[in-house]
């Protein structure tokens, strides 16, 4: 066995050991806990979105910033970043506040897309983002869902 083969074998063993020592982590659970209005510029709406971040793992998560993006009907609707840092305790939760911006032009595009003549029965959304904990410690999250729009029943005068 040459020195090169021995070196490759040792490197492979270290790589396997590194993979085996990585903990199995469950994904973070993130929901919107609240929203507050913020002052914005002329063509935007600003809100402070409060995210409830739940950590179902046995190790705490330290973070130095957050990012969130909200897609509605497959198109970006709002996004925001925060340099707020903190800790999500092991098997615990915390509130992370992120200011987000909604472009009025994006909002008009969304409404126009909904008014294309086809009835819209449900609206799908996806909230994705990350808590930045450093170079190798970024925790990403995704929450998807849909809600049905109320159907308008014809009134008694409809023929």
Image: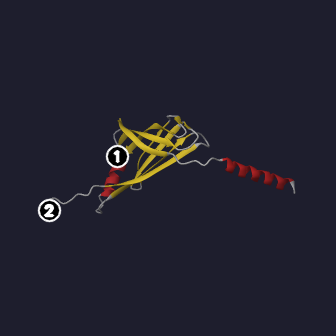
How far apart, in angstroms, are the residues tagged by discs 1 and 2?
A: 35 Å
Image x and y of residue 53, in percent: 48, 41
Callout 1: SS: helix
Q: Is residue 132 left or right of residue 120?
A: right
Residue assigned mark 1: 104
Q: Is residue 89 left or right of residue 6?
A: left
Callout 2: SS: loop
Image x and y of residue 43, in percent: 34, 42
- Which quadrant: the N terminus? bottom right
Q: Is residue 156 left or right of residue 114?
A: left
Residue at x-position 83% and y-position 53%: 6
Mark earlier in primary sequence (1, 2):
1
| Residue 158, disc | 2
Give the vertical position of 125 relative to 41 (above or below).
Answer: below
Q: Which color mode does the image show?
A: secondary structure
Residue at x-position 61% and y-position 42%: 135
Question: What is the crowding at mark 1: few (fewer than 14 residues within 10 Å), some, or many (at least 20)?
Answer: some
Q: Nearer the viewer, residue 105 or 123?
A: 123
Q: Quadrant of residue 48?
A: top left
Q: Quadrant of residue 90?
A: top right
Give the vertical position of 109 relative to 34 (above or below).
Answer: below
Image x and y of residue 82, in percent: 48, 37
Image x and y of residue 127, in percent: 44, 49
């Amino acid at each position: 066995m040459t020195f090169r083969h021995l070196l490759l074998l040792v490197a492979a063993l270290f790589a396997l050991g590194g993979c085996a020592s990585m903990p199995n982590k469950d994904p973070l659970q993130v929901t919107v806990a609240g929203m507050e209005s913020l002052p914005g510029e002329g063509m935007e709406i600003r809100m402070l979105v409060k995210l409830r971040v739940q950590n179902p793992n046995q190790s705490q998560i330290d973070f130095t910033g957050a990012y969130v993006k909200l897609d509605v009907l497959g198109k970006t609707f709002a996004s925001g970043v925060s340099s707020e840092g903190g800790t999500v305790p092991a098997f615990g939760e915390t509130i992370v506040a992120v200011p987000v911006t909604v472009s009025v032009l994006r909002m008009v595009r969304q409404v126009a897309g909904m008014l294309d003549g086809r009835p819209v029965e449900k609206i799908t959304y996806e909230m994705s983002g990350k808590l930045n904990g450093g170079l190798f410690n970024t925790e990403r999250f995704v929450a998807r869902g849909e809600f049905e729009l109320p159907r308008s029943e014809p009134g008694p005068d409809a023929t």
